[in-house]
Amino acid sequence: METRQLIVALLCAVALVRCAAAPQRWEVEEAPQPADVDSLLSESGVTAVHHRMMPSEVPPIPVRERLRPCCAFGSDLKAKLGPVPVPAYQIPNIIGPEDVGRHGYDSGTLRLGSDEGPGVQFNAENNGLVYTCRGGFVDTAHVRDFVDWSVFAAGQVATIVSSGQPGEFSLPDEGGKRRVLVAAVDPEVVQLLGLRRVAAFSGAYVAWFMSVWHELATWYGYASVPGFSEKASAFSLEDLYSNGLGAKLGALLVDRRLAHSERTFRRSVDDWLPGILSYLGAVPAEVGKEAAESVDGLWWDSTVRLPDYRLVKRRSVEPVPPIRPWLIPRDRMPDSLRAACGHAPEPALIDVRQGLTPSVKIADIATLEVVVDEDWLEQQPFKRMGRKVTDRDFPAIAEEVRRQILAELGPGADRPE
């Protein structure tokens, strides 16, 4: 065991050195381009040009390929291989706000869906579950996943909208072939809001529905690593709330021009993520662990080993914002949590913008389409809906998942209390 730990430590050290020396993957050219000058001369003033966002300012953000693993709900989780328990193995996935590491775009341990094949990458993000007084448990890996997807989608939308023509962009397969269809946007709307804001709001919207699809797909059997079921984390009580945080943070960074280079983006997430956790009332790791243990038997079952999906006894199936966090019930709050949060903390709801203006819905501009794997047609509601579904279908699919959750996990499995 000591030899293995030494090898891992050496690999991590090498990986960190490489990471520090690696060039960033995108950066917008700061010098004005011919298109920028043309816009300046044809616009009424400098303010209008800045508001509009130049096509040359759209960063060439690469699509994500890596798996950022974390976290099944619970504390000190146990595992098994097939029917055989893994002895002396626990997953300590509760962390405190001071433990959150530095962000890396598309960070993760494995590269998935790439022609280059799987690849190993170490990182310093140190993801886990942080309990917050007003936001419940926050999965920092989910926040990071969807801040990444939000800025990626915003860049794709900006490129298409600036062309004045409809277009589309592909996403990695997840339970089927995925793509985003982008309609042409009324130039008056673009002029009113600016291209940057149109892209920011639309990117967050796309990222949100990508996150909903991820929860749906993992319930129906999709696994990032074949053979390792993720059903235990499908619609886990902290997932959608964490996803929404990430999508909204991505929109903010795009809108404030904090994603124009990978370096600026990473530093901005490092600034904002601790601030968000602090605002929500993040507690130290030991208090968070006591919070998780206080709902053992209610929200999760410590006697169940991963990957058994019955580990998580209750699921939050809320595909339409605003999302209400699950806070530890008052009668189960340990003294340490009551001291940190008070008796009845006010929950902080998460909303994801659904419209550009009161009359222009983002759903009419950006559509996430999935052509599900053929073998899914054996399950409802795909047997009824067919293989091609869009984000407009997700609420109906989620209701079918809710029905299955209640049937398999028991009455009340979709509620915190």
Image (cartoon, rainbow, N blue to C red):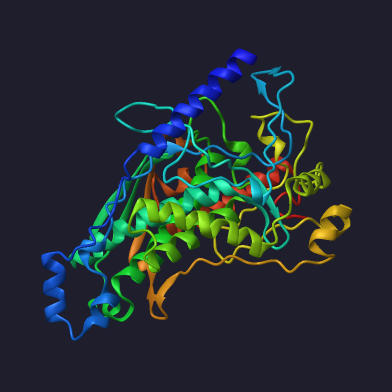
64 lies above or below 270: above
* Number of marks in picture: 0
Q: Is residue 105 left or right of residue 404?
A: left
Give how far across and how far down residue 284 sits, in percent. Answer: 74, 50
Residue 91 image-quadrant placement: top right
Between residue 271 and residue 232, name the one nearer to us. 271
- Decide if residue 14 is in sight here: yes
Residue 132 image-quadrant placement: bottom right
Residue 196 image-quadrant placement: bottom left
In the picture, the quarter occupied by the C terminus is: bottom right
415 lies above or below 49: above
Give how far across and how far down residue 149 sits, in percent. Answer: 42, 51
- Decide if residue 1 is in sight here: no
- Residue found at x 69% / y 48%: 96
Between residue 109 and residue 386, name the one nearer to us. 109
In the picture, the quarter occupied by the N terminus is: top right
- Residue found at x 81% / y 46%: 290
- Residue found at x 39% / y 56%: 264
Q: Is residue 366 left or right of residue 270?
A: left
Between residue 258 and residue 153, name the one nearer to us. 258
- Residue found at x 50% / y 28%: 12
Give how far across and how far down residue 360 sits, in percent. Answer: 37, 76
